[in-house]
Amino acid sequence: MAPPREHVVAVVAHPDDAELMCYGTLHRYLEHGATVTVVVVTTGVNGVSLADRNRGVSLSDREREAESAASYEGSGIDLLPLGFTDGALVPDRQLVSSIEAELVRLGCTVLITHSLHAGPDHQDHLAVAQAAVNAATRVATCTTILHGQPHAPRGDFHPTVLVDITDLLPDKVKALAEHQSQAGRWYLSEDFTHHRAAEAGWSLAPVQAAAGRRFEAFETSLITLLVPEGDR
């Protein structure tokens, strides 16, 4: 019997988080035949500063940007907004239940979410990571959890998995550029994107990094399912 098709679900806090954290990884899964869905928990409305609003940026711009980035080059990535308000997320019953319902409905096999050490990076990232992991423990199909590298440098992030995105890096830069409402943020810049993709390799694959390979980095949580002999 052929193994079931993977359904990779990235659960992220804000409209630009999936591109920042795992753009290349999601496309690698697509190349291997997986179904890929990005669940964006918040609207990102509070990520539009007063200065942004004064230059005409609106909530609809953030929503449109997320859709454009997800569909860049006709990728086939599905986008699912949950509509929470950003800035004050907590991993309470409402958030956990909302994420759990989607993981079950989608038949998630691989969950990608924020680091559990992402507090100073953004409080919403930490709340989403805690809620997503909580939810995944009750999703029978979910066997792998990947925690993406925080946007801001963190000394307590210790990657155990690298995904080679060398050929996808130019497309990742273009996808990030779709988020024009966030223009000027250092973590969205092309220079930082290249720097972080190079830095990730030096920790675990220095030979490949020296040869010019570029990566996205993750910590992992694995849920081992023990299948009774008669059910195999």
Image: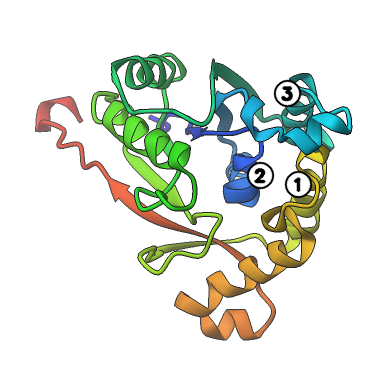
Which amino acid is tagged 3?
Glu
Picture coordinates of residue 131 (x, y %)?
34, 30
Amino acid beneath label 2: Glu
Q: Is 18 situated left or right of 76 in this image?
A: left
Q: In the rendered structure, are the residues bearing label 2 and label 1 in contact, judged by CB atoms less than 8 Å apart?
A: yes
Check disc 3 and report the residue beneath it. Answer: 63
Please tell me whether residue 189 is drawn above or below residue 53 in the rendered image. Answer: below
Amino acid bearing label 1: Leu
Q: Residues within 10 Å of mark 1 (few under 14, many from 20)?
A: many
Q: Position of residue 139 (x, y in %)?
A: 29, 24
Does residue 225 appear to the left or right of 7 in the view shown? left
Q: Residue 12: tell me if it is visible.
A: yes
Residue 169 location, quadrant:
bottom right
What residue did someone put label 1 on? 176
Q: Residue at x 30, y 22 (%)?
A: 92
Q: Is residue 175 above or below residue 43?
A: below
Query: Which residue: 47% across, 77% down?
Result: 203
For label 3, the SS is helix
Residue placed under numbered mark 2 in the picture: 19
Left or right, residue 66 beside residue 110: right
Instruction: Report the front residue among 13 and 52.
Output: 52
- Find the distance from the CA under tag 2 to the CA under tag 1: 6 Å
